[in-house]
Amino acid sequence: MFRTMSSKKMITLKSLDGQTLEVEEAVAKKSLMIKNMIEDDDVMDDDVEDDDEDHVVHLRKVTHKVLEKAMEYCKRHVDEDENKVVNENELKAWDQDFVVKTDKSTLCNLLLAAYYLNIESLLLLLSKNAFHHKTSEGKKPMEDMRILLECQQ
Amino acid sequence: MEGVVMLRQLIGQLQEFVQLYGSPPPQPLPQLPLLNYARWCSSTVDDSSIDDYYSFMMATGKSASVRILDPSKPPPSKRSRKERTQGKSSGTTEPMEQRIWKDFPEDLYEAVIARLPIATFFHFRSVCRKWNSLLDSESFSQHCTEIPQANPWFYTITHENVNSGAMYDPSLKKWHHPTISSLPTKLIVLPVASAGGLVCFLDIGNRNFYVCNPLNQSFKELPARSVKVWSRIAVGMTLNGSSTSGGYKVMWVGCDGEYEVYDSLRNSWTRPGSMPSSVKLPLSLNFRSQAVTIDSTLYFMRSRPDGIVSYDMVTGVWKQFIIPTPLHLTDHTLAECGGRVMLVGLLSKNAATCVCIWELQKMTLLWKEVDRMPNIWCLEFYGKHIRMTCLGNKGLLMLSLRSRQINRLVTYNVSSKEWLKVPGCVVPHGRKRQWIACGTSFYPCLTAVA
């Protein structure tokens, strides 16, 4: 297949349900787990199937929907690793918007994915917001937390 | 009668709160209700034994939750319709979340809690025994050390009350007033260095060292030094590895070139050797400046000749660097950010005073000015005799600027070049802004052990 000279290297991610998602290598590498898998593959690349040396990474614990969300985050944050010119306030606002717009069950699965895929900044963002809605209701935060975490006093 | 007094106190606190914070912050962080909740609690619980919400939670542990929740009722408030419907909707999603949380691996549960804002961690510490025991858990400790360092906190001593500290959290812009019960109350003890979440204190007579984690009260009095030095000393502290479980070292050095190193693993002081002849004696140390740590090397500021001396805690090697000090400079201290050595000081020319930041150019060994305090802030200092104290020099600097009428606290973020005003430090039930005498910055770590 013909590729333009300036195209960035793409990685194909395959989720639990068999669907694929193509992302730029730098974006995918924000996940330390994916980064290690790619770099391990590079070391032992005698057995490459494609002529284009396209990497296909199988992620058996993440669904397509959650993977898309995770990569959306990584794409927005890829600049931090490459150059230091980042508008911190804008980024923070985008992060909060990202969390608010995502429904609670996807957020929980995203948290699991961030942990599994080892995306530190996403894990940090989601952890900080993990109990937010509990503390802001004010009435009986301790009791609510006990119910949430299913623990005895 | 008591009720009216309490109500007045609450109104006063709420007014101060509004003054400090103005409009609520744009991000939905849990600091607003947390602050109100804490202040209400501290005004209803017995004052004689409690100085602050933090020390209360830490000292009494689980029983604290019972005392806080039962006798004090949250102030009655009319919940708006919006709040009520929000409360309802979260009720319907709760069962789903419950299932998910239950299925979370233990590892993830600890990883999430380790990443919570520290104030939130302490707020929920008495939620259950499992949470409460996290501070002692090794796996939780491991998670805490793996988190990338955020902004440091500041442990300071106020002029008014030298026996208890005031701690500043720059992410929430909040002052806390912990009471470290193990610190001697008869002596005046000052924070002089920190590493890995631990703060090192030295008593004012330069005799005894104490190491403590202000967040979990872990405390140790270091054994007596083998050399009796009564003159002033400079102190530095480093971690052996990436966390306190690998041990730490504390080092002091005097103007006559005497120095000693304490190793926490052996719990003893040793004298590794004597100062090499390359370091000119007497070593005129700048005692207003705290040491700077980069990897395992400590850097101290000296004069006559002006420059820096460095000591590598691993190799035991001393080096001297002659660096001319910028002109018209006073109250200067060393700082560091991301491995770069910086200098911060007051530049006074004619009647104008300004705070300036320099970075050390390693190739030429010269200070290069990289930033200045915004002019509009410096105008206030015109014609006045200002003294500046640096209360924290790791990446985020806290500066105290004082004259007879002025008492300003600012922070400067070296990497983002951001200058921010610090809300005044007021003790609980107090109104007067405290004058911060000295302090040190430390990276808060819930599980660091002295």
Image (cartoon, grey):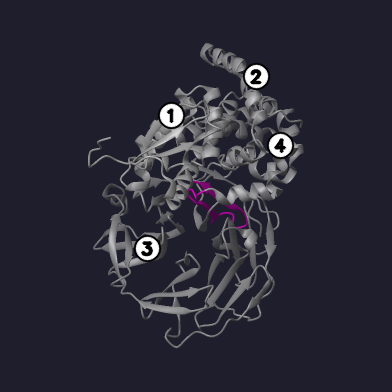
- Find out whether the residues at labels 1 and 2 contact each other: C-beta distance under 8 Å: no
- Is residue B150 in the magenta section? yes
Which numbered circle lies on residue B342? 3
Q: Residue at 60%, 41% (x, y): give it.
A: B111
Report whether B54 appears left or right of A69.
right
Q: Amino acid at mark 4?
A: Ser
In terms of depth relative to the viewer, which is nearer, B32 or B13?
Answer: B32
- Find out whether the residues at labels 3 and 2 contact each other: C-beta distance under 8 Å: no
Q: Is residue B440 above or below residue B308?
A: above
Q: Nearer the viewer, mark 3 or mark 2?
A: 2
Report whether B370 appears left or right of B441.
left
Q: Is residue B199 above or below residue B54?
A: below
Image location (x, y in percent) of residue B434: 51, 49
The verdict on a common chain for dots 1 and 2 is: no
The verdict on a common chain for dots 4 and 2 is: yes
Q: Quadrant of the N terminus of chain B?
A: top right
Q: Nearer the viewer, mark 1 or mark 2?
A: 1
Q: Amino acid at mark 3?
A: Met
Q: N-terminal of the two: label 4 or label 2?
A: 2
| Location of residue A55 by image quarter | top left
In terms of depth relative to the viewer, which is nearer, B310 or B230?
Answer: B310
Image location (x, y in percent) of residue B61: 73, 42
Q: Nearer the viewer, mark 3 or mark 1?
A: 1
- Find out whether the residues at labels 3 and 4 contact each other: C-beta distance under 8 Å: no
Report whether B183 appears left or right of B14.
right
Which numbered circle lies on residue A20? 1
Q: N-terminal of the two: label 3 or label 2?
A: 2
